[in-house]
Structures are given as C-alpha cells and as structure tokens.
Image (cartoon, rainbow, N blue to C red):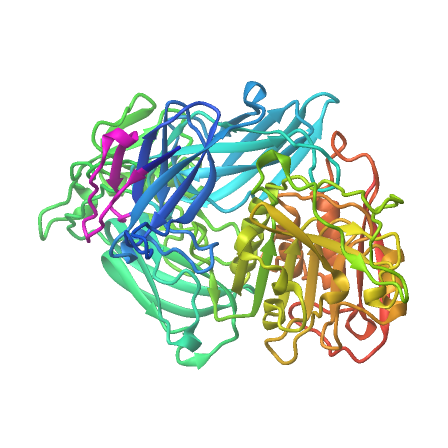
Amino acid sequence: MVSALELALATSAFAQINTNLQFTAATSTDEQAIRLTWASTNGELYQIQFANALATNSDGSTAWQILYDQYPSQGTNTFWLDTGNYNLAPVVVHPKNSALRFYRILDEGQDSVVFDEPSVSITSPTSGTAATGELTITVVATTDQPVISGTKLYVDGQEMQMADSTTNWTDGSTNYEMATYSINTCEWGNETHTLFASVECESGHGDASNAGSIASGHGVSVFVPVLFSNLVTRISFSQPSFDPSSGQTQQVSAVFAANCNWTLNIVDVYSNVVQTASGSGTSMLYNWDGTSNGTNIPNGIYYYYILAQTNGESSDFVSGGSSGGSGGNPPSPSFARSSAVGSDSSSSMELWAVPVDLSGAPVPLALYPPGIDTSGLTIFEASPAEIQSLRPSVSRISFSAMNSGGSFAPAASGGGSSASSQDSSATPQRPPNNPVRGVAGTFGIAYDTYSANGTNGYSSIPKPLTYPGGQPPSRIYVEGFGSADYRPQFGPVLPFTTEANNFVAAMQKGGWSKGFIKADGQLSINDLRGSGTPFNSVNLGVLMLHGTIGTSADYTAGGCQQIYFPITAGTGAQYVRMSEMNFGGAGTNGLKWMVIGACYSLTHAKWSSMHNAGVRPVNSNLHLILGADTIMYSSDELMADLAKNLFGNPTASQPVAPMTVEQAWYAAGSQAYANEKLSISAPVIFAVSGNDACLNDTLQTNYPPTGSYFYHTATVYTP
C-alpha cells in the first residue's frame, strides 16, 4: 500500500495534502525541515520515498527514491522529520536546500513477530525535564527473542547518531540492552522537544545458509517531552563535511537568548586552539576557511566550542522556535525583559525560574515558551547581580552540566558557572554535520540484503559450473554436500542496512569521505569481477554478503576449492567466484584494505587452496584483506566498531590510540558479539591475510606491500 504526498517547497515551505491518501499533516519547522504525519497501523513498517520532480520517466511515471527505510509505526498516527539523508549516495540534502520535494509513503507490511514485539523505553531523562548543554539519554530495550539488533534515538523525528555505548545481558530467557546517547541541546532552539526511541529484535541470525526464515519485530517508546533551555542556542553549520581544498567555507552560526559577548574556539583533537573569533550581539556568524589565521593545518577532526556571556545591554531577541518536530508555526514571541537605555542593568528586576529541587541553574523565565507547565519550577524575582551573588554560596545552582567535560576550557571571564554565561559542549553532535576539516581518506561500501523475495530468500541459485579436462561440465559441490543438485538457501539479512548506515556515519565522523554506497539492486555481479571494481577507487572497502564454500575442485580456477558469494538481481541470483575478484588499487587514492563481511569469506582451507593454485582475489597493491574463517554474524555495531577502533579517541579522559587495521577487526568482532549467548552457539573466528610488510598498518600510518603473504586468525567469540 502506498500513500503519496505532493509537497512543493519554497523558502517558507508549504504542503498540499490529499487526505484520501491518509496523510494527516505536513508542516515545516523554523529550520525548514519537513514533518510528515500519516494515519498508521500498529506493528507496521514504513518506507519514506521522495522525488525532486514528478513524471520524470518516459512513460509519465515518477522515479521515486528511498529516503528512509523500515521506520516503525508509532501507533495509529506516525510522524517523521525530513532533514535530508547524508548516508545515501548521492546524498539527499536538507529540504531547505531543495527547491522542490515530493513524498510517498510505502507500507512495507507487518512485523513478523507482531504479537511478541520488543519493549523499549527512555529511562532518563524523564518527561518534562528541563535540559541544558550536553544531555545524556538512556534507552533500555527488552525482548524474549534471541537477538536485539540495536536501538535508535530520535529527536522530533530525526534520527541521531548511534549510541555512545551499549550494554547487553540476559537472564536466560530475556535479552536486555541498555544504550546511552549524547546530544548537545544547544544545537536546537529553546522549546520543548520530543524524544523517543525504537528497537528491532530478531528470532535469530540469518547469516548462515539454511538458517530458515528469520522473524523480526520493532518497538517504539512513549514520547518524552524535554525542554531545551540554553543561553547558546541553534548552533548550526553550513557544510555537513568541510573540505576547504574544494573551495568550501564552514559557516558556524548560533543565536543567544540575550545580548551576549561570545567567543568561538576551534580546537583540534589534542586540545590545541587553532582558530578563535569573538563578538557581541544576539547571534553569531563566523566563516572559517579551514586555516589557523591563514596558516594551513592538517586534515582531521576539529571541535567547536562557543562561550557566551550576557553583556548587560538591552536586547529584544525573540527566543521562540525550534529545530523541528513541533509542527505548525513557531510559538508566539517571548521577549526577554531588558532595562532602559542608560540604566544599571545589573540592578533591574527580572523573573527567574529554577527547578524546585535546585537541580539546575536559575534562568530567565523569558527563556521558557509560553504556556509551559511550570509546576516543577520555582519562579522568583531578582536582579542579575543578586543571581550572581547567590552562586558562590549555592554551588548546586550552576551550569556545570554544560561544560565540555574534556581537557579544553575556554579562557574567558566567568567560565561557564553563571546563569548569564554558557560554554557549549563540543559541536557538532547533531546529524548530519561532522566535526571534520578536509578529507582524510575515502571509503566505499556495498551490501545485499537478499530481501527481494520477502522472507523466502533465495534457494534455487544454480551452482557454478566446472569443466574437468576431458569430462563434461558439472556443478560445484558446496558445504560438504556430495550432491550436484544440492542448493543451499540464503535468507534475508535486513540488519545489513543498519550496519551499513552506522559504518558510514562513523567513517564520516572520522573525516573520511564516502566514495560510493551500493545496496541490493545497485550492486551488480560485475562490480565484483576484475580490477575494474569500484572498490579499487577508494582506500577502504566493505562488502557484506552471504558466503559459502566449495567442496569439490573448481577447474575454472586452477582446480582449487574456493569461496563463492550469491549476488541477487531482482528475484534471481547467481554466484560470483572469489577467484574472479581482483582487489587492490595503486596510488594515494587506491584500495589498501578490503573487508568482506560474509560467512567463510577467508576460511583457511579454501584460502590456502586458492593461494596454492595462484588464484588469489587480490593484487600486489592490496595491503590487507579482512574476513571470517567461520560463519560470522551481522550486527548493527560491528562495522561501526571497526571504524571507531581505527580512529581511536585521543580526546577521552584516558586517550585511546588508533588500532592497527588487523587488531581493529578482531576487536570489533569481540565488541559486537560480546553478549550473544542466546543466539550464537559456536565459536566465531575472524581472519586477516595480506602482505606482512603491512602488518602494522593504521589508517594514519601505513606501509607499501613489499613483503610476503601471511594468514592470521583470532577467535572473537566463544559461547
């Protein structure tokens, strides 16, 4: 079932709705993000599609593209916020940067475990909390299904970055996951925003052949309204990923809830301030050219800190508005009280609000939107001077929660300790912006979810033919079955989509540029054959597929026993031989490291047989190939953990150095499978092969492949 909405966007953004198609609302936020609301059914999944123009095909139909997939129902009414999708290739920009955008909603059907859905809730913060600065959100999910495929956090319908940390455990019959997320509330406007979380569970892992159909289910938490209340608000950036070498300028902007003196510090990962700007007023706008006062600096991650301190001048700044999700027009303007020109602003009386338990700082009542429930606040009248004098004796009333928590502390009078000053958390944290300057490297990812046949998967793929000398051609035997007619079944692996999205986000956050993404029908079998593969045009490649092993000689490849991967094309599929692959690219932009996330992708016996027959799937340019010696399993965190391990975390309280490529792969497997007692019953062994001169390769420092080949394994999971 498809519902269509034709939405024409102008600067002010408006929508024309056909109510017969079950759309109930379409509104534009003050950021010109588009909130779509439609009548929905419990347990359904929805796909949001878009087009920039109608009737673009030769037959007069419209070429719709997927914007967001597998969005779970929120009950009888569901809403979602379009802020673009920067995980796609090509990217879908924010609606404000698109002249026209048309939408269509596809109902993808019910969850297969609709009567046994998982449960998910936001346990912190609680409904009605007033939040300042960096906010930590705790999400807890439970299910009696063997697999929790991960949670997602949304603010006003916009998906956030993946969780900062997750903890899984089981009591033997129930699986639990606790995830923590961090957002910088200064990147939104001062008003109430809606938080909610979702979770996906599965009846098992569908990665192994003949695993059978895997049922999945989704849960959505209740909505948690939270008031964002900051002196520094609406921090935003013009470039999702900033590359000054291509002529880009990063425009950093913010607004303030009062007339302020502000300072912007741009800081590298070692806490060195590389650029500073300052000014005053009710807003800031700074264009950074990517240099340190005209001096070139290395590509990499750079953090932005904004310190604002009220300067006592008159202000008529309007504090309403939000970053999206509130729907309709912005709230009525709320004006901060200000003294007359020439008066002593420090002695003018204002209304202030503080939580009744003194858990937060007193802030001007004018920061709260009209009509807010004030039952959890104490309202009192005082002058700014009186508020300032109150602070030294009441240490709990502070903005300490807004401090960055890192090693950088702006050198400015007043720091972040008064209600009339604020040091924002390191930004950006809100998608799709990434705190990068330049391009550190390029990556590409391709995957096949085997979902075109629904839950049936693929079970009738003709096995590859082999041509023994002087004998008629015959089919390869696979996985130990001594029958030429045996054909394994390969079921859908829908988690590949989330796994890929998390990997893309983690790589882009680390300053790497996306070369390509190929999913399902976009991935052709010819993309994996020969040296012309698109993977050879990026530095790091990731391929996620089913895999199987041959157990009879393949005479088209030197008589070896080798590895095969089914590649789908619509409802049909065929195998690509690993011996047909030729990974490795020359030069700075060539492929150095290749990850094949598939069962048996580097199983030792077959890899040795191929090596001995001289039919390796790599050339002399490839440094390392990463895979699995055994069955391996999809995980929403696996590839993102690989990326995080490769980058390290030099800004942590105990800095974490980048891992070598080999060790990052093993560690990612251990991290992703750490709590899979209900779903994985056999050891999982990861493998790495390549040139031993590249054993100590990191993304930051690597070596030319001048040595001999090696093969290593590590057990990453033991039941």
Q: Percent x, y for residue 690?
A: 79, 68
Residue occupying image coordinates x 21% and y 47% = 13
Q: Nearer the viewer, residue 350 or 142?
A: 142
122 vs 580, nearest the viewer: 580
Residue 477 within the segment the image draws in magenta: no
Q: Quadrant of residue 369?
A: top left
Whether residue 6 is in magenta: the answer is yes
Which x, y percent locates residue 626? 74, 60
**Residue bounds of the magenta highlight:** 4-32
Q: Quadrant of the C terminus?
A: top right
Query: Which secondary structure is most common in the magenta stretch?
Result: loop
Classify 668 as above or below 472: above
Query: Farthest residue in the top direction?
Result: 115
Q: Position of residue 5 (x, y in %)?
A: 28, 40
Residue 706 is left or right of residue 499, and the answer is right
Q: Is residue 89 left or right of residue 354?
A: right
Observer able to see residue 595: yes
Which corner quadrant of the image does residue 253 belong to? Answer: bottom left
Q: Is residue 639 left or right of residue 335?
A: right
The residue sitting at the left extreme is 341
- Residue 51 image position (x, y, % from top left): 33, 51
